[in-house]
Image (cartoon, grey):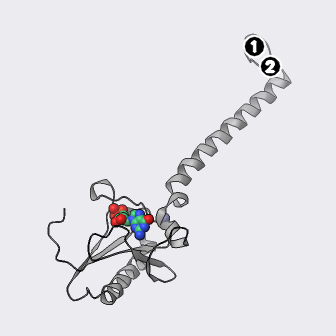
Amino acid sequence: MSREKQGKKWEKNDYLIFCFEIQDLFVTIFLIFVTFYGGMNMGDCIFCKIIKGEILSKKVYEDKDIFAFEDINPQAPVHVLIVPKKHIEKSLDATGQDKELIGSIFMAANKLAKEKGIAESGFRLVVNCNRDSGQEVFHIHFHLLGGRKMKWPPG
Ligand code: 5GP
Ligand code: ZN
């Protein structure tokens, strides 16, 4: 129904229709927000799905806060990804509350390096953050790489 009633007073029906239209608008904005915000977060996160067991992985370590598994496309004889179970998109998003969590990832890396026999020969613990680093998966993760001689500077 058109509301071009220039000069005319609004009737009760017009107010009702107007209210419904405003309500529709808010519902639409809410749905757009949920779709985009949810899409960028845990809902679609590969690593959250791996942690929950919804995507298969070769698990090498797990405790209440951390999950570690073999990288699907290894760049060295040993290539493990160590991730917190908490969904943090990137290292820039870690806060003071995550200090202990990040520290425990280092401890898990040391333990895994020893188990994998690369502690003495040497290894790299790499965290990519944002575009220039080549970060592809936006759930913070530590690459534990070893078992071959590595170059510096990195590519
Ligand atoms: P980034 O480039 O984000 O630092 O590293 C992402 C890493 O995750 C890559 O080394 C890639 O091979 C690995 N990766 C991506 N998808 C999967 C997957 O579904 N399973 C496993 N195990 N590794 C994955
Ligand atoms: Zn995640």
Q: CA distance from mark 1 to mark 2?
A: 7 Å
Q: Callout 2: helix, strand or loop?
A: loop
How many C-alpha atoms fall within 10 Å of the one at disc 2: few (<14), some, or many (≥20)? few
Q: Residue 103, how many percent across, how many down? A: 38, 80
Q: Is residue 102 visible?
A: yes
Q: Residue at x 43, y 62 (%)?
A: 89
Q: Amino acid at mark 2?
A: Trp
Residue 144 picture location, percent across and down: 31, 76
What residue sits 59% from the left and 50% below the top?
34
Q: Helix, strand or loop at disc 1?
A: loop
**The image quarter in which residue 69 lies:** bottom left
Residue position for label 2: 10
**146 or 27, which lies in front?**
146
Q: Nearer the viewer, residue 73 or 4?
A: 73
Which residue is at the far top?
A: 7
Q: What type is the residue that disc 1 sits on?
A: Lys
Using the image, determine if residue 89 lies above or below residue 68.
above
Where residue 91 sits: x, y (%)?
37, 65
Which label sits on residue 29? none
Please name whichever residue, 1 or 13, is drawn nearer the observer in this view of the structure: 1
The mark nearer the N terminus, 1 or 2, is 1
Name which residue lies at 49% across and 54% down. Answer: 40
The residue depicted at 42 percent of the width and 77 percent of the height is 68
Q: Is residue 9 above or below residue 89?
A: above
User: Marks 2 and 1: in contact by CB < 8 Å?
Assistant: yes
Give the quadrant of the N terminus: top right
Task: Pick the quarter of the image with the C terminus.
Answer: bottom left
Residue at the spot of label 1: 5
Give the total number of marks visible in the rendering.
2
Q: Is residue 83 above or below residue 133?
A: below
